[in-house]
Amino acid sequence: MILKAEVLLKLGVYSDFATEIFEVKNFSTLPVVNTPAINFVTEELFTTTQGSGVKAKAILTFGTSVNTEWEDLGVTIDHYDVEFKKSTEASFQGAGTSQGTNFEFFDIEPALYEFRVRAVNTVGVASEFSSTTQRIYGLTAVPSDVSNLFLRADSNTATLSWTPTTDLDVKIGGFYEIRHNSLTSGAVWAQSTQIGEAVSGIANSTEVPLLVGTYLIKAVDSTGVKSANATTVVNTVTPDLFQSTQFLTRTENPSFAGTKSNLVVVDDKLKLEADTLFDSLGLIDEVGLIDAAGGVDLSGTYDFANVIDTGIAAASYRLSSAFAFTTNSTSDFIDTRSGNVDDYESFDLNTYDDVEVQLQIATTNDDPSGSPTFSDFQNFRIGNYFGRAFKFRLQVTSGDITHQVYITSLSATLEAFQKFDTQQLTSSTSALGVTFGEGFLVTPKIAVTAQNMASGDFYEITSVSSTGFTITFKNSSGTIVARTFDYIARGF
């Protein structure tokens, strides 16, 4: 750059120019604003003060933009522009600005996102964007597995305790689901029956019926997403038999003689029926694999062949169940598999999460041999039910026409609680028939205490049944006499 100067004299005469040369570097280019580096994107759940429940937020964290050349001129970074978009969207949208090195995206939906940030200095010059891609799961994220599950056995009750999860959407709007399986080893979630009601997501203990077998627990968040793995504890303590007893078990396998809808029995296994009739398949050469042709029905039901009838007035009973099944794909054969054998998850058998087997129950206070009115079917849970008779239905669903279920065992058991019946009565000069106020399933034990017995008096108890007994008081001569007495009957 050349700079010239001249001097104007009083007479209007100019002097010669004086010349000085200066070098100005990069006159046409401003210094670059360095791009801030993105460190990571994390996500958290939060609650709102407006009571709208649990929401998700993403947190973008990035480094500061250091610009020595600008700082030498007294220019610093003023703020950072933040933008984002879903991977399916064409254009970015502005999220806002940050004075620091992080930015929070509140109430963000689950999706795959691209986030970007740039630095802007105090004279308005911006850097290039730096970007990163991150999937946000939000409320669809799988809750943590439950930890430290313990069991304390007490008579007929099991007290379960565990360490509460830290997942906010379990604590708020979520719950714990507990299941039971009669197996003491090898129990799996899908083949276990829910026991008791759902437990609040802020709780860390509950009481359930004491049963031999395995208890399993999962955390369930506010959207119904369950823990990936069930946490288990095994109980080998037998419930107090003086307080309850197994009265009746209905076992449906291997014949499965009950009423079926879209289900069939083949080789002692209950499975979904084929969705396509053989006669409608067309040319055999064009069908391919016969077993997979047309697929299977996506749902079916099986009603137990017989109800459980206690035969007495309605009362409270504990009901439990047991079933076992496997799943497989009708189109999964070695010849159709690709990849390395070492990479197969299972060589012989596949399991599918979209196949569900759910037992249901309906109850009645009426005699089932007459014209009973049963309740609607509801999903069965191990626990106490009130009624005289109980019927069961198995509901099977599959999420894919090639995913088949093979049910090998199915049963339901009624357990009766110990009960007492007691009265004070006065006999006459004939035998007295006593009818229990409580109905017993089996003949109870009876104890009698007489109030006004004379020397040599005695009594005889006959015709003892589940509904009552006959008692006769006699004096020393064998003559029937009237006496006042108390009795207590104990049984189930």
Image: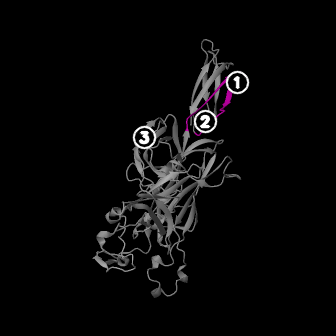
> Which numbered disc flags the more N-terminal residue, 2 or 1?
1
Whole-percent x, y for residue 231 in the image: 41, 50
Q: Report which residue position mark 1 lands on.
A: 430
Q: Residues within 10 Å of mark 2 (few under 14, many from 20)?
A: some
Type of residue at label 3?
Leu
Q: Secondary structure at mark 3?
A: strand
Q: Quadrant of residue 62?
A: bottom left
x 48%, y 69%: residue: 85
Asked if disc 3 and disc 1 are in contact, CB closer than 8 Å, the reply is no
x 48%, y 61%: residue: 97
> Which numbered disc flags the more N-terminal residue, 3 or 1?
3
Q: Secondary structure at mark 2?
A: loop
Q: Is residue 444 left or right of residue 116?
A: right
Q: Which residues are magenta?
A: 417-441
Q: Report which residue position mark 3 lands on.
A: 151
x 52%, y 38%: residue: 244
Report if residue 181 is visible in the image: no
Q: Secondary structure at mark 1?
A: loop
x 61%, y 50%: residue: 390
Q: Report which residue position mark 2 lands on.
A: 465
Q: Residues within 10 Å of mark 1 (few under 14, many from 20)?
A: some
**What is the CA distance from the residue labelled 3 to the residue labelled 1?**
56 Å
Asked if disc 2 and disc 1 are in contact, CB closer than 8 Å, the reply is no
Whole-percent x, y for residue 59 in the image: 44, 58
**What is the CA distance from the residue labelled 2 to the residue labelled 3?**
39 Å
